[in-house]
Image: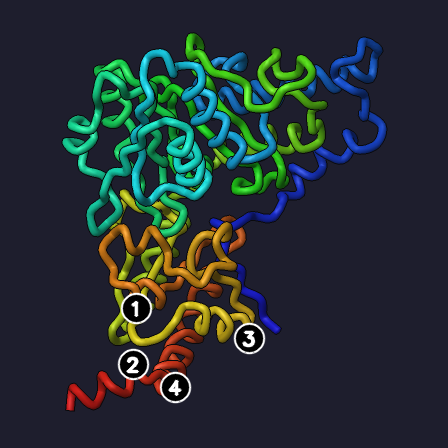
């Protein structure tokens, strides 16, 4: 059966060049970086090289790059660490209703422990109102955490403007950039970003490795305690091979960024236009350069997304109805509800995300395959039957 992978927002494959860099660190270059003999010095140097590769991609100093076990850990560390370090200044955090659950659930945890959290509304395309942000900041606000690009509907936030507001008001700014790295140009200095989270497996690197960028001068409490690794900030023996893979992956992702964006933007727009020819369909999220280049999220009325996914899987198409982290939930996407969709329409959405392995033939296949699936599922839907009766 033909396989068309369109779930790059969930995870990517490891590129051959990345795997090649990693392999020696599973076997001959296995020394613990905290030891003092030759093979350990070699792994220490390799880790520092990867740190430099990440720093170059973000335009920061290597000393501001800290390895984590993934994007979720980086989000947890940023929010909990700042909350603890600045609790004498205030107990107020600002975020948005469309954040990843790694941020939302962390904020909910802090609410149970004496902190106040403001969850900003978003418009129908997923953007916060900058005036709402300004008005929400008080003398007790210690952190604003807004994701760089939404993992479900592809909305790219006005990060530079948010950063400028936070800097002017003396509030720290964290951004979850897990979906943005490798898809959007990022400059933490120019954008006034104080903390940034990223994950290796979204950029053709290995799973189980991430980074938290922490600007020099920012106080933060540790999330994981133990040894003195990561300059006494994050305990635990380093995941050496994955760190090397992350460094190579982010180097490749940023070297070819313009070409990557151009290719995926063309494929994205073709797929959107093709799917919107299906009756009673709508695009979730913005069009144009304010949307991630490989992200397509389309809603189909009168049917459920899970049924679409099963039918597509039978045809060899890998897709999702939202975040991979909530794929086991029967609840509609919190992102789609936040942009104003009623429950019944939020349930009928399909997310297709593309990457380096996506071809024009893949897009054509989906455009050809999906309409008969939608038609068949609607014929089985009582909602569709009632709608047709009412139309007549």
State the CA–CA distance, disc 3 to disc 2. 24 Å
Asked if residue 42 lies left or right of residue 185, the reply is: right
Tell me where residue 196 appears, x and y as whole percent.
43, 26
Q: In terms of secondary structure, where does tag 4 sit?
A: loop
Asked if residue 243 lies left or right of residue 148, the reply is: right
Tell me where residue 201 appears, x and y as whole percent.
57, 41
Q: Which residue is mark 4?
A: 380
State the CA–CA distance, disc 4 to disc 2. 9 Å
Dot in front, 3 or 4: 4
| Residue in view at x 41 percent, y 34 percent | 112
Q: Residues within 10 Å of mark 1 (few under 14, many from 20)?
A: some
Q: Residues within 10 Å of mark 3 (few under 14, many from 20)?
A: few
Q: Which residue is mark 2?
A: 383
Asked if residue 22 lies left or right of residue 14, the reply is: right
Q: In terms of secondary structure, where does tag 2 sit?
A: helix
Front residue of 138 and 15: 138
Tell me where residue 5 appears, x and y as whole percent.
53, 60
Q: Are circles 3 and 2 on residues that touch, CB within 8 Å?
A: no
Front residue of 176 and 263: 176
Q: Residue 373 has which mark?
A: none
Q: Are circles 2 and 1 on residues that touch, CB within 8 Å?
A: yes
Q: Quadrant of residue 258?
A: top left
Q: Residues within 10 Å of mark 4 (few under 14, many from 20)?
A: few
Q: Which residue is mark 3?
A: 314
State the CA–CA distance, disc 4 to disc 1. 16 Å
The first of marks 2 and 1 along the sequence is 1
Q: In terms of secondary structure, where does tag 1 sit?
A: helix
Dot in front, 3 or 2: 2
Q: Residue 344 has which mark?
A: 1
Q: Which quadrant is the N terminus positioned in?
A: bottom right
| Residue in view at x 35 percent, y 68 percent | 348
């Amino acid at each position: 059966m033909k396989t068309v992978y369109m779930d790059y927002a969930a995870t990517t494959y490891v590129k051959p060049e990345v795997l090649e860099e990693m392999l020696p660190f599973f076997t001959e270059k296995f020394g613990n970086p905290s030891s003092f003999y030759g093979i350990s010095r070699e792994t220490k140097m390799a880790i520092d090289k990867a740190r430099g590769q990440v720093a170059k991609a973000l335009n920061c100093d290597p000393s501001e790059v800290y390895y984590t076990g993934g994007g979720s850990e980086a989000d947890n560390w940023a929010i909990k660490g700042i909350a603890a370090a600045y609790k004498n200044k205030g107990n107020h955090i600002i975020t948005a209703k469309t954040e990843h659950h790694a941020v939302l659930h962390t904020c909910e945890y802090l609410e149970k422990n004496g902190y106040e959290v403001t969850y900003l509304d978003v418009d129908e395309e997923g953007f916060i109102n900058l005036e709402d942000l300004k008005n929400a900041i008080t003398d007790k606000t210690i952190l604003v955490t807004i994701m760089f690009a939404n993992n479900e509907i592809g909305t790219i936030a006005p990060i530079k403007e948010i950063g400028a507001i936070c800097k002017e008001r003396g509030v720290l700014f964290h951004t979850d950039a897990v979906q943005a790295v490798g898809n959007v140009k990022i400059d933490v200095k120019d954008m006034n970003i104080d903390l940034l989270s990223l994950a290796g497996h979204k950029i053709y690197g290995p799973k189980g490795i991430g980074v938290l960028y922490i600007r020099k001068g920012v106080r933060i409490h540790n999330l994981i305690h133990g040894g003195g690794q990561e300059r006494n900030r994050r305990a635990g023996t380093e995941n050496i091979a994955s760190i090397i893979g992350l460094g190579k992956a982010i180097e490749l992702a940023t070297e070819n960024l313009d070409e990557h964006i151009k290719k995926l933007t063309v494929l994205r727009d073709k797929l959107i236009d093709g799917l919107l020819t299906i009756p009673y369909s709508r695009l979730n999220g913005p069009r144009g350069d304010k949307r991630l280049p490989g992200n397509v999220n389309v809603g189909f009325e009168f049917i459920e997304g899970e049924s679409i996914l099963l039918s597509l899987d039978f045809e060899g198409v890998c897709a999702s109805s939202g975040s991979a982290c909530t794929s086991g939930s029967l609840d509609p996407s919190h992102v789609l509800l936040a942009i104003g969709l009623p429950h019944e329409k939020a349930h009928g959405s399909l997310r297709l995300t593309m990457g380096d392995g996506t071809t024009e033939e893949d897009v054509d296949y989906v455009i050809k395959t999906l309409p008969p699936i939608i038609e068949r599922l609607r014929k089985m839907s009582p909602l569709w039957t009632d709608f047709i009766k009412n139309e007549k």
